Amino acid sequence: MKKIICIFCVFISTHAFGQEIITNNIAVNEAFRLAVRTVDINTRRDILAAGADYGGEWTRDISINSWNGASLLRPKVAEKSLWSITLNRDTIGHQYWDKIIWVIAVYNHYLVTGDKKFLEQAYKCSANTMNALEQQELDKNYGLFKGPSVFNDGIAAYPEPIYEPANNSSSVLDHKNSAYIKCLSTNCVYYGAYIALSKMSRILDAGKIITGNYERKAYNLKQEILKYFYNNDSNSFNYLIDQNGHAYKAQEGLGLSFAVIFNIIDGNKAKELIAHAVVSKYGITSIYPDFPRNSEQKPGRHNNIIWPMVNGFFAKAAIVAGNDTMFNKELYNLTHLALDEDKGDYNFREVYNPYSGKPDGGWQANGDKYPEYHWDSCKLQTWSATAYISMVLNGIIGLQPNERSLAFAPYLPAGISNIRLKSLAYRNAVLDISIKGKNKVIKTFSVDGKQQKNHFISSAMQGKHTIVIDMN
């Protein structure tokens, strides 16, 4: 009875807000509805909170949630939330090392809304923040930005000597050496932010010199990322460079995902990188393998453990690289983690155990000595839900927003042979999208009953339109 009531409430909420998917896969339908419902539950005073047990003060959470679907499905909420984490709309606020991800989110927000006034303000805020971070955090000896890895604000994400065993604080910033490290995911985000700044400056006619400077800085940073993090012989990336200049050769799930998503590595190398990634039974873990102080019995909170937000980006990287197998695994793993009675039980939780699939917040700091450092896995976590939303919208339906168009590159995995997305608001249009068939070769693409060779619609389109895609 519990599940029937939950499904019914979720259906009513999703349908009422004008977005509903219908596929021949009941579990995917229910998980998507649950994900959208989670976003709405966590919207408080039009600000998107990180989860049921958190507020909305984290720049990374709001940015990632906007990027992964809130800007498209809930644009007004996303806009207010994005501004809420700035200082007077002049600079980006909160924890310094990964706040630049906001730049990527606001550029994406413009792509799906077309709001040029928003873009003008967001560009100034982005440029001001990047300038300050270049002065404060760029290590000129490496050409890389300093600071912890994206979202990993707990010391459980770091090996010794960054982690100080005698220091019982769970905060990475309380471990002094964290200020001097360079991490893969963080530098990939800076690269993505430079690319976004170059595109925003061009749209706003800021001048060829300014746009060229951002492009040059992006190029230089990409070369340094490949120089210091990439291992050509093994086609793998290091996780971080510690304060002593030592490269730590662990797999950072978010870092390698961003490296592919931002095309720092592409082609066959990207496809092989995704194919050879170490993935647990329930999906890729945050950082593999376990640090010596952690184990299967005591997984580190940010170490070898599942954060669905990371899985969402890994799924997106799999789509970019053309690795259908990995995308399928992450899609259906997260479906089960959210819905199964012995796992999320119709709840997108914050963290899951990679061995059992059960919600598990993991261990932070010295768990043997201080048992209170075993954390809970919080309920109704927004970025776990938006990770799933992105899997469906950007992965299965294949939405690709651009400056002048919305392109489609669908992929129907095994288990789904048709999908319909009703009443999707895109800029000044409302779209009813139907896709049928299998795999990812488009046989016919029609808009309002008229077939067209190009698989996109103009961003200037207005009113209601029906898009039908038949896959070969």
Image (tube, rainbow, N blue to C red):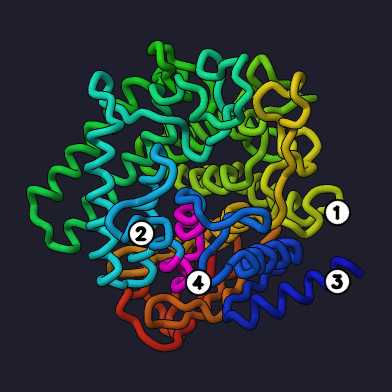
- Specify whether residue 73 is painted magenta: yes
Amino acid at pointer 1: Glu
Q: Identify which residue, 224 or 40, lies in the foreground.
A: 40
Mark whose residue sits in front, 1 or 2 = 2
Distance in Å between CA atoms under marks 2 and 4 = 14 Å
User: Do tag 3 and tag 4 residues touch (Cβ < 8 Å)?
Assistant: no
| Amino acid at pointer 3 | Ile
Q: Residue sitting at 35 percent across and 20 percent down?
A: 228
Residue 285 painted magenta: no
Q: Are marks 4 and 1 in contact (CB under 8 Å)?
A: no
> Is 236 positioned to the left or the right of 100 in the image?
right
Label drawn at residue 78: none
Q: Position of residue 94 (x, y in %)?
A: 43, 47
Find residue 310 and report its horizontal and vertical position in percent. 57, 43
- N-terminal label among 1 and 3: 3
Per the model, the C-alpha gap separating discs 3 and 4 is: 26 Å
Residue matched to label 1: 341
Give the label on residue 4, or none: 3
Does residue 472 appear anywhere in the picture? no
Q: Which residues are magenta?
A: 62-80
Q: Residue at the location (43% across, 81% down)?
A: 447
Q: Quadrant of residue 407?
A: bottom left
Report x, y in % for residue 49.
Answer: 57, 59
Report crowding for label 2: few under 14, some 14 to 19, many 20 or more residues within 10 A (C-alpha): many
Give the crowd class for mark 1: few <14, some 14-19, many >=20 residues within 10 Å: few
Which residue type carries mark 2? Val
Q: Which mark is residue 106?
A: 2
